[in-house]
Image: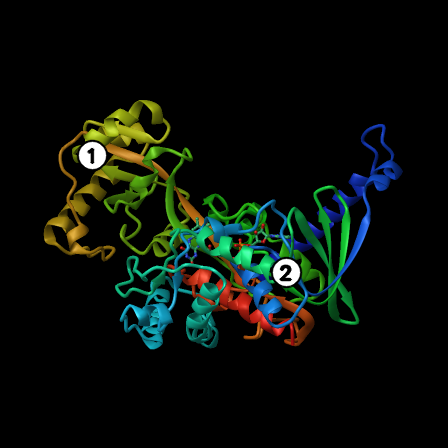
Amino acid sequence: MFRKSRLAVLITCMLVISLLAGCTQQAPTSDKTPADDKKNTQSIEKTADVVVIGGGLAGLSAAISAVDNGANVILLEKMSFTGGASMLSGGAMLAAESHIQKEHGMDQTKDELEAYWYEQQAKTPAPEGYPNKEFVRMIIDEAPETIKFAEDNGVKFVKPSSFYPETRDRLHDNEQKSGAGLTGPLTESAKEKGAEVLLNTEATKLIEKDGAIVGVIAKDKDGNEIIINAKSVILANGGFSRNAEMMDSVEPTSAKHISVSGVGNVGDGYRMAEEVGADFHEEDWIIGLRSQAVEGKSALNGLSWTTGLYVNLEGERFSNENAPYSVLYNNTTLAEIVDYFLIFDSSMSQMLEPELEGNKEILFKGENIEELAKATKMDAEELKATVERYNELAKKGVDEDFGKQPELMVPLGEGPMYALKVRATQMGTMGGVKTTKNMEVLNANGDIIPGLFAAGEMANRPFYGRVYVTGSSLQIAATTGRIAGVSATK
Ligand SMILES: Cc1cc2nc3c(=O)[nH]c(=O)nc-3n(C[C@H](O)[C@H](O)[C@H](O)COP(=O)(O)OP(=O)(O)OC[C@H]3O[C@@H](n4cnc5c(N)ncnc54)[C@H](O)[C@@H]3O)c2cc1C
């Protein structure tokens, strides 16, 4: 539901706000004068062949591949540590025909992976033109090389596995079973190979000369301005999952959901790219996860992975509860649902009874459906009809309404009944600038902007319709980063 014009307006607003912020910062707010402030900060000039903005998986891969190709590289990361959302992730990378699979006698093919990719995309209707077949095939073809690249740079992969709805072992987990098992070794490797990693350093503006990008302006945590003159710049600053306004311009319902992405992912790259005339994809979307108990870190969060009956705040069922998590998320979003209830019967009493006292805002109990409806403020008639219909379909052994697997259609039984309120949760975005398959950024005329490249969530829109496939996003980040690193050194 993204409108390019809305994003353009929003980015312009961000630009104006940042300019205004710059103006107000110059106004003295204490005894100190602007001149005093200036005395304490300095402008530092540096030179590099390639500057990489962002130290997540895309940025680290880009930095390493640029160094491998002989470039002098500076990587800017605005947080005090590298990793971004990549570090917070499960660390699983999707690939077929990797050397690791071959070593384990696994015979998955790229063609099978491609078929699976499109099977998943078909589960949520997507805007015309997405995904782009050439980009999807590019990732699938390059994925084995990327797995080798990550391994050569210190990642310790274990035997690949699968995750529902996958039935083939295409997920490349690492020994740490986390994103840190990727970004940790890659950070070390980038530094060992000679990339200069500047932490607490936020890129603020691209330097343009005669239509080409020739550097970046950044600021460090002490307010010093760092001007880096470079032959190429790679935007690898992630998406905008943590920017409520940008999320709202793409999909207002999602803006109200929980984001578990890296806190640095506020769309800085969008603004910088817009300022130099980059073209953007028009139909951004969200990488969905399942849900979390509304009160944050509740122990009840784990129940979000159970697959019983889910109802909206009116008491209506809205999805196959066992749909792949990104599809369940899409169903929630498209139905404009922010919070919903997981319904349980007395079979869960042992776990839920002790939790009632400490979770009054999110966990509700009723001796029967009518009482539960009263406790949750759901429509009693609606909830009763929903439970009756669910039980009827469960007994029939066919979910005629949403297509859930028959073995998961377990009828709800005796009271007491419980309802856990959860909020839909997302972990990233699908969007960014338009690029060639070499990750060169394009302008509105479809021409390459010399010196500007993009990778990861900053350029991941063409790979998806609206369905995130488990393990795909890390693979896209690492592969597009690796490719951008090569392109930037040519
Ligand atoms: C909890 C969670 C679990 C996930 N699990 C998986 C999984 O198992 N498999 C999978 O494929 N995907 C998974 N994903 C999605 C995947 O992790 C991300 O889509 C992917 O890592 C994005 O990589 P990136 O390099 O583009 O962005 P990031 O890793 O977020 O890196 C962007 C970096 O840029 C920095 N930055 C931003 N602006 C600036 C600036 N102006 N100057 C300097 N630095 C800047 C940020 O601080 C950040 O460090 C998961 C995501 C989350 C949150």
Residue 218 placed where, x, y %? 72, 53
Mark 2 residue element: loop
Q: Quadrant of the C terminus?
A: bottom right
Q: Residues within 10 Å of mark 1 (few under 14, many from 20)?
A: few
Q: Residue at x 69, y 70 (%)?
A: 451
Q: Residue at x 85, y 28 (%)?
A: 31
Numbered circle sitting on residue 195: 2
Residue 296 placed where, x, y %? 42, 35
In the image, residue 402 sits, relative to residue 138, either above or below, namely: above
- Identify the residue at the far front of this view: 192
Numbered circle sitting on residue 348: 1
Residue 334 left/right relative to 341: right
Amino acid at the residue labelled 2: Ala
Amino acid at the residue labelled 1: Met
Residue 436 left/right relative to 375: right
- Alpha carbons under labels 2 and 1: distance apart: 54 Å
Q: Nearer the viewer, residue 22 or 92?
A: 92
